[in-house]
Amino acid sequence: MKIKLITDSACDLPLEYIQNNSIDVAFLEVNVKGEFIQDDFGQTMPHKQFYELLRQGEQTSTSQVNIHTFEENFEKHVQEGYAVIYIGLASALSGTFNSAIAARMNVLEKYPKADISVIDSKSASLGEGLLVTKACEMIKRGCSKEEIVNWVEANCSKVIHAITVDDLNFLKRGGRISAATAVIGGMLGIKPSIKFDSEGKVIPGAKLKGNKNALRYLANQVVEKGVDLENQTIFICHADVEENAQILKEMILEKVAVKDVVINYIGTVIGTHGGPGAMAVMFLGTER
């Protein structure tokens, strides 16, 4: 049976990759100046424009994908004879995954033989994107749907998210961390780091002094926690600090050999919670 791979816009993969591999995307939305716009990889609102608004004090909010959107998407591909795999934003961060679960149940009521798998990536941004690219590669290699689903589910919690932010108040505002945790974001010269636990919840990491130490920390996380790096593609994402992303890439390559490095913007949904200046590297490791 043919396989259709679906994800959501929180994967933050390059638009060109999405288009070239015919991956379907369910778009989350961002409320900017009272208007909801699609988180569509910078097409509706360029990333630089979005982060400039945040720097100017604009307070944005996010909206999950609704059940109806997933129902339409799943049903369309089922009618076309596809087996469906949806890899979604961590359920610990958004109700989008639960919308997909509900939509799957509704579609199965109409089409009892439909083959739809809904996977909680327990990841976000290019961590989620990493899993999508792996699934895409497996489809191209002719792997069965069962093989793909089993691999993704087995490796979700092995995707390491090493993240630094300029201001933890963005995460506090979105309810992703407590007010007490956010206090360190205001400490002079401190660059907070965060990471994901095994379920995809955001938890505090090391407190870093200065930008250079923050970049060094991110590079060292790859060295210390990465596995089979020579055969891995490492994913770096940034909130409008591309120069730092390029420096981080060079720092990683000075320490270890990797298959490839992909750099892309953090999209508007994840960027709403991370804020301008956020940096992250995602890769496969042993444990979070």
Image (cartoon, rainbow, N blue to C red):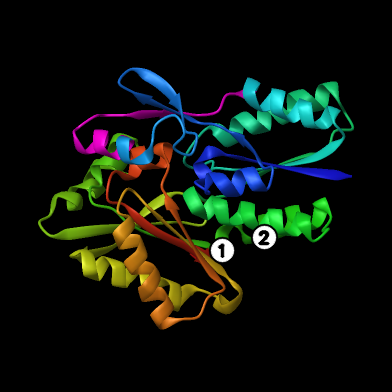
Vertical order, 252 against 111 (above or below): below
**Residue bearing the label numbered 1:** 158
Residue at the farthest top position? 34
Q: Residue at x 48, y 48 (%)?
A: 125
Q: Is residue 277 left or right of residue 78?
A: left
Q: How many residues crowd around disc 1 within 10 Å: few (fewer than 14), some, or many (20 or more)? A: many
> Please, what secondary structure does the residue beneath circle 2 have?
helix
Asked if residue 205 can be seen in this view, the reply is no
Magenta residues, start to end? 50-67
Asked if residue 146 can be seen in this view, the reply is yes
At label 1, the amino acid type is Lys
Q: Which numbered tag is attached to residue 225?
A: none
Q: How many residues crowd around disc 2 within 10 Å: few (fewer than 14), some, or many (20 or more)? A: few
Q: Position of residue 155 (x, y in %)?
A: 63, 61
In the picture, the quarter occupied by the N terminus is: top right
**Residue bearing the label numbered 2:** 154
Vertical order, 90 against 281 (above or below): above
Q: Position of residue 242 (x, y in %)?
A: 33, 56
Circles 1 and 2, Cβ within 8 Å, touching? The answer is: yes
Residue at the farthest left position? 188
Specify the quadrant of the image occupied by residue 187: bottom left
Residue 58 counted in the magenta span? yes
Depth check: give the residue in front, 27 or 118.
27
Tell me the CA gap for discs 1 and 2.
Answer: 8 Å
At label 2, the amino acid type is Ala
Depth check: give the residue in front, 129 or 122.
129
Q: Position of residue 239 (x, y in %)?
A: 33, 48
Specify the quadrant of the image occupied by residue 88: top right
